[in-house]
Image (cartoon, grey):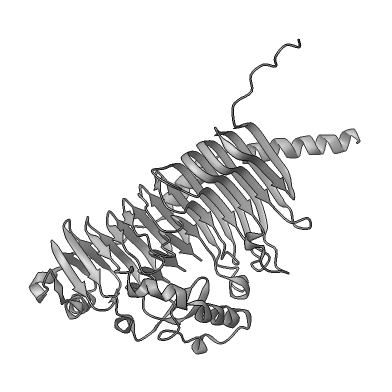
Amino acid sequence: MSFKVLLILLISTVSFAQNSEFPSAKVDSIVKSIQLPIIPSYQINILKLGAKGDSISNNKSVFDKAMALCRKNNGGTIVVPKGIYKINGPIHFVSNVNLKIEKGAKIKFSDNPKDYLPMVLTSWEGTMLYNYSPLIYAYECSNIAITGEGTIDGEGGNIWKSFKSKEEAGKNRSREMNHNNVALKDRKFGESCFLRPQMIQFFNCKNLLIENIRIENSPFWCLHLLKSQSITIRGINYKSLNYNNDGIDPEYSKNVLIENVTFNNGDDNIAVKAGRDHEGRANTTTPSENIIIRNCNFKGLHGVVIGSEMSAGVQNVFVENCKTIGYLKRGIYLKTNADRGGFIKNIFVRNIQLDEVEDCIYITANYHGEGSGFQSDISNVHFSDIVCNKASESGIVIQGFPNKKIRNISLKNIEIKSAKNALSNENAENVLMTDVFIGKKASVPTAAK
């Protein structure tokens, strides 16, 4: 090797090491750019409109009327006082509204699927289509909030839960429509298709705040941030253990702050997504980006996930100062496959404390071994200051393809105290490890006898 080539390699390595440092200034800049909603002073207490918090009476018309009054007054706050308010159907937001659910108040949705018709434009696992309305739905709204210390109960554990075993045909049809570029107007699902609705979905919205509420018993994904921006989620907590109960799913969304959230979910705590397959790759101008996750408590299936639906790309995700408070299968999980395409890049994770997991850090370009022809590009992923007490399977897994290697991965100050399998590093290049310990730390070598 010539001196010139050696010098270039040395400079490149030093530059990569410097670029792997957690970019706090970039995080601060994103946080400053996020706008909180501006809500007019008008307020309406639902009791004044005849609501009954007796857990039996249907308050659907009351909430519709409250939202209509807010529209008439160019926005305002809908106050939900202490009580259990049954609603047989969805809440559809208008702009400039704060739904304030006070301490001791619970909104309890019906679980009759017919209550969530007519269908609305939505998305299901990365494919745009018409389906049951999400239980709380906002489309093309700005300046909206859900606040207070009350609870939203999606009643997802009975009828909706039974849909899981019946969804295969509808799910496959949605994916065929995605792959065949079927016109959106012809993607009609709803009755007899068994695709469960999200509990809360903000679609094409901006300046959003979700703060301090409790989310329970969702039919499907809990909080879906679809094609939205300038979002603050803080102080909320979960107990939602049904099938596919992801906690927070940003999809095609940007400038998102998620902080001080306590998760307890039947699936991923946070899953950053960006569309599926052909449809996702056609939307590369709207990747999911500038997402900050900090000071959160993880409990559920996986902590922070990117993918697997990420075909429009995911970039600039910053995770810091988080820990587990219970079981977690995987801590940080980046997953895609050869159906997806797109990219995952500029991911920074630091100061994470994990107790017992199956796998601590897992990066795979071959999720479920599915697909062909559209391998994803994974690069510039940085982990630092991570402690894990035990990995019952693998400490660190990196899986690329021979002809599409994962590139530029740095791991610094990683301590996994116990792991069945320490490290699997396959089809990756420029993987830099600094002070990485898996299992018992080695001391000085013993003397020969």
Q: Vertical placement of 4 versus 41: above or below? A: above
Q: Who's the residue at 52% across and 85% down the image?
A: 184
Q: Position of residue 43 (x, y in %)?
A: 15, 67
| Quarter of the rendering containing residue 422 | top right
Indicate whether 148 appears above or below 311. above
Residue located farthest toward the bottom when viewing the structure as drawn: 186
Q: Is residue 75 above or below residue 15?
A: below
- Residue 333, can we see it? yes
The quarter in which the C terminus is drawn is: top right
Q: Nearer the viewer, residue 140 or 124?
A: 124
Residue drawn 74% across the image and 53% down it? 405
**From the image, which quarter does the N terminus lie in?**
top right
Is 86 on the left-hand or right-hand side of 128?
A: left
In terms of image quadrants, where is residue 72?
bottom left
Q: Is residue 42 visible?
A: no
Q: How many marks?
A: 0
Give the image location of residue 188, x and y in percent.
Answer: 47, 87
The residue shown at (52%, 81%) is 169
From this view, report whether residue 92 is shown above or below residue 298.
below
> Residue 90, percent across and down?
29, 76
Q: Position of residue 26 (x, y in %)?
A: 51, 46
**Viewed as shown, does residue 335 lie left or right of 243?**
right
Q: Name the residue nearer the viewer: 397 or 351.
A: 397
Quadrant of the rendered structure where residue 446 is?
A: top right
In the displayed orientation, state which residue is furthest to the right: 2
Which residue corresponds to the image point at 32% horizontal and 56% vertical from the top-left?
A: 239
